[in-house]
Amino acid sequence: MNWRSPARPKGKARKNPMKQSRLDFTKVDAALLPTVILVGRPNVGKSALFNRLIRRREALVYNTPGDHVTRDIREGIAKLGDLRFRVLDSAGLETAATSGSILARTTDMTGNVLTRSQFAIFLIDVRDGLQPLDVEVGQWLRKHASGIHTKVAMNKSESLDEHGVLTAAAGEAHKLGFGDPVAISAETGLGMAELYEILRPLFEEYLFKLPNRLAWQDFSIINQ
Ligand SMILES: Nc1nc2c(ncn2[C@@H]2O[C@H](COP(=O)(O)OP(=O)(O)OP(=O)(O)O)[C@@H](O)[C@H]2O)c(=O)[nH]1
Ligand SMILES: [Mg+2]
């Protein structure tokens, strides 16, 4: 399913995944929104997904100093249907994951970025199949971000239109150990509806579990 409508429903509920919506994320204080970090080896499409999610407007660019390099971490508010969340584009994270020589900076990254994230979307390039670097990123995540709920996204899936190929790729991606993958295309928007359906209950649960119930008790409840 290729659902790309950004607008909130007006009037009658539309026939899309938002129908089951309860919390109105558009009313949630931005500071309380869950944070999702996009991770993966180079070129898998993290920035492409980031740009799609934030619609290229709200990117905030800032630098996270490391030992030898400057990391640019882009942050924005993602809009996925009526869902809102903070999203981080982790340029450079894969380097930390794949180079044993910069473990110190890995620790920096853990402190600066991972502790701010409750969720991760772990992108792989479905056209390449599972690569050793993907496996390393997965191991790195398990080691440094074990508390982060991680979902694997098979990006560039628009290029695999044969069902059997995608099923085989999903079987392979499952081996990363983060559950069932979701097939997406950051470029065409394929799979955004599935991503929405996966993320919404997780984010609702996250918000309901926030310690300060006063913080969310005023959220609008919609479609009840
Ligand atoms: N066919 C296809 N190409 C894509 C898709 N998403 C990204 N790309 C292409 O893949 C290349 C890498 O995309 P980026 O978004 O820069 O990848 P990245 O993971 O941010 O790369 P680094 O920042 O270098 O780690 C670009 O040429 C994109 O146009 C997709 O869904 N389908
Ligand atoms: Mg990038």
Image: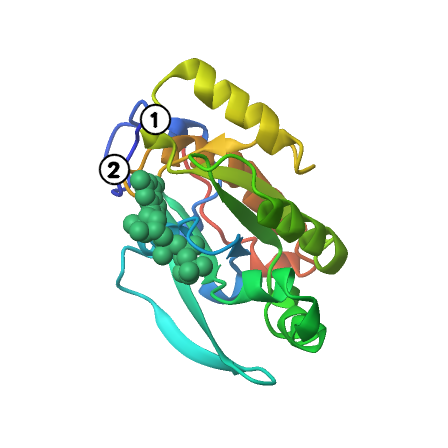
- SS assignment at label 2: loop
In front of the other: 194 or 222: 194
Residue 160 is labelled as: none
**Residue kind at label 2, given as amino acid type:** Ser
In front of the other: 115 or 135: 135
- Where is residue 93? Give x, y as percent: 56, 64
Residue that badge 2 annotates: 5
Q: Residue at x 34, y 67 (%)?
A: 59
Identify the image quadrant of the C terminus: top left
Nearer-N-terminus badge (1/2): 2
Q: Is residue 88 above or below residue 108?
A: above
Q: Is mark 1 within 8 Å of ligand 1?
A: no
Residue that badge 1 annotates: 16
Q: Residue at x 66, y 74 (%)?
A: 102
Q: Classify residue 129 as left or right of residue 213.
A: left
**Residue kind at label 1, given as amino acid type:** Asn
In front of the other: 31 or 76: 76
Q: Residue at x 48, y 51 (%)?
A: 219
- Where is residue 113? Give x, y as percent: 59, 69
Regarding ligand 2, which quadrant of the image does it lie in?
A: bottom left
- Where is residue 48? Give x, y as percent: 34, 52
- Where is residue 175? Give x, y as percent: 67, 32
In this rendering, the count of numbered labels is: 2
Q: Classify residue 70 as left or right of residue 111.
A: left
Colour setting = rainbow
Identify the image quadrant of the N terminus: top left
Q: CA distance from mark 1 to mark 2?
A: 10 Å
Q: Residue at x 37, y 37 (%)?
A: 156
10 Å crowding of disc 1: few (<14), some (14-19), many (20+): few
Q: Are marks 1 and 2 in contact (CB under 8 Å)?
A: yes
* Rendered image quadrant of residue 11: top left
